Image: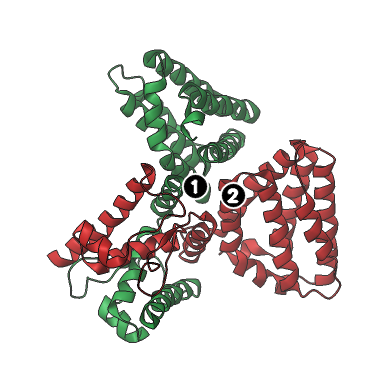
Chain colours: A red, B green
Amino acid sequence: MDETATTTRAWRMVLERIESDLLEGRLAPGDRLPGERELASSLGVGRSSVREALRVLEVMGLIRTGTGSGPTSGAIIIATPQGGMSTLLRLQVAASGFPLDDVVSARLVLECAVVEALAADADRSTDAAHGVIEAMDAADLTPEEFLALDAQLHLAFAEASGNVVITAIMAGLRTAIESYIRAGIGRIADWDAEADRLRLEHRAILGAIDAGEPGRARTLVHDHITGYYLDADLSRASH
Amino acid sequence: MDETATTTRAWRMVLERIESDLLEGRLAPGDRLPGERELASSLGVGRSSVREALRVLEVMGLIRTGTGSGPTSGAIIIATPQGGMSTLLRLQVAASGFPLDDVVSARLVLECAVVEALAADADRSTDAAHGVIEAMDAADLTPEEFLALDAQLHLAFAEASGNVVITAIMAGLRTAIESYIRAGIGRIADWDAEADRLRLEHRAILGAIDAGEPGRARTLVHDHITGYYLDADLSRASH
């Protein structure tokens, strides 16, 4: 029993040490952590505790772990928040910690703010969004391919708005409900008609952004998201 | 080298198995996972891989791990998203994955939406917020105590709005910049005057919510957050 408690403290201690090294600038993105063996001996903990802390950092998107031994075997600090956020949100939705309705409401709040800010920004670039919208015109897309491009379009808006925190959270929220969104395809009576409607809505949203009309962009995105949500009957899927 | 690669795959496989068990309802909050030894043998992986996956789930707020052996030693599914979100955001801010300015902008988007929704909701209860605001009137609070209550107040608004996803993200964003907010105290010339100003602003925000004025609540929260941000010179702290 004591042994388990000690092990628990040990991996948390490794995590806290790396966090404080990051906060105080002793570690920065691009830096390589010492190998497992060296970390273990310098921190006075077992190698398994080090490995547990490294897994946590890896899933959270803080490090990329190397394989093999030798000078290139240590993990590299990367700080790519999107992956970690997606995993966390996906797991919480799976474990019923996050009701689907609340995820959709959170998406609405963030996506409306994103397009509003984008429309209000004279320096915006919407080239990426235009590219995705053209790709979505292809006639032979499966519903799954269409929805993958759809996710890419919404992300392009977030990226163009320039806020990496909001982009990571939006990407995570979308990933978290991806399986429900895909399951919703089967509940849509006429997919071709739905896809045509979504295409028109995308063009209208992008038009409002390019025309610099924040209020209209916000309203269109709101109706666009709630519309698919209702058509695919996603609200019922969460109960 | 092969051994490391195999180990990596093994812990991810444990994680994916637990996620699919959650998604398909074979596991639910309150359920107990089998012990490490049993999980390892049923999944055909080593105990250390099981332990690595459990640590990830623990930090993400998905399980509470038991100590000791015997029938009560397995981890329990809990699904409490706040802790995991806070850890993730805090680590990403520490590793410069998330610039402070973007965290503050994301907070603004979410907090403005929260008070707007609350003011528009005829069934809202603001009792918790009133309680915290009264506690903040105490004359002998240290700046640290004052800011802890401040965080509690903002969380009370989020909780009253009823969206657990937004509440978890807001709590996480606040935690992520807690050390910067506290460091900002030292850059405020007259703390007592600042605290009095914050008290007045809190009462005005709560007044707008209780009066059912969404637009005014939103504007007041926006000015409240950006005001402290400027006074404590937090923007410079991120560079």
User: Could you tell me which secondary element the residue under label 1 belongs to?
Assistant: helix
Residue B46 left/right relative to B200: left
Marker disc for residue A237: none
Q: Can you tell which quarter of the image residue B178 is in?
A: top left
Q: Is residue A35 left or right of residue B180?
A: left
Q: Would you name the residue on which mark 2 appears?
A: A106
Do tag 2 and tag 1 residues touch (Cβ < 8 Å)? yes
Please tell me whether mark 2 or mark 1 is closer to you in this view: 1
Quadrant of image for the N terminus of chain B: bottom left
Q: Is residue A41 above or below residue B213?
A: below
Instruction: Tell which of B132 and B180 is nearer to you.
Output: B180
Residue that badge 1 annotates: B169
How far apart marks 2 and 1 lie (CA) works out to: 9 Å
Residue A24 appears at what percent x and percent y?
36, 41
Answer yes or no: is residue B31 visible: no
Amino acid, disc 1: Ile
Q: Position of residue B213 (x, y in %)?
A: 62, 27
Asked whether, in this view, residue B115 is left or right of residue A216, the answer is left
Assess disc 1: are there few (<14), some (14-19) or many (≥20) residues with their C-alpha within 10 Å of its C-alpha: many
Q: Chain of mark 2?
A: A
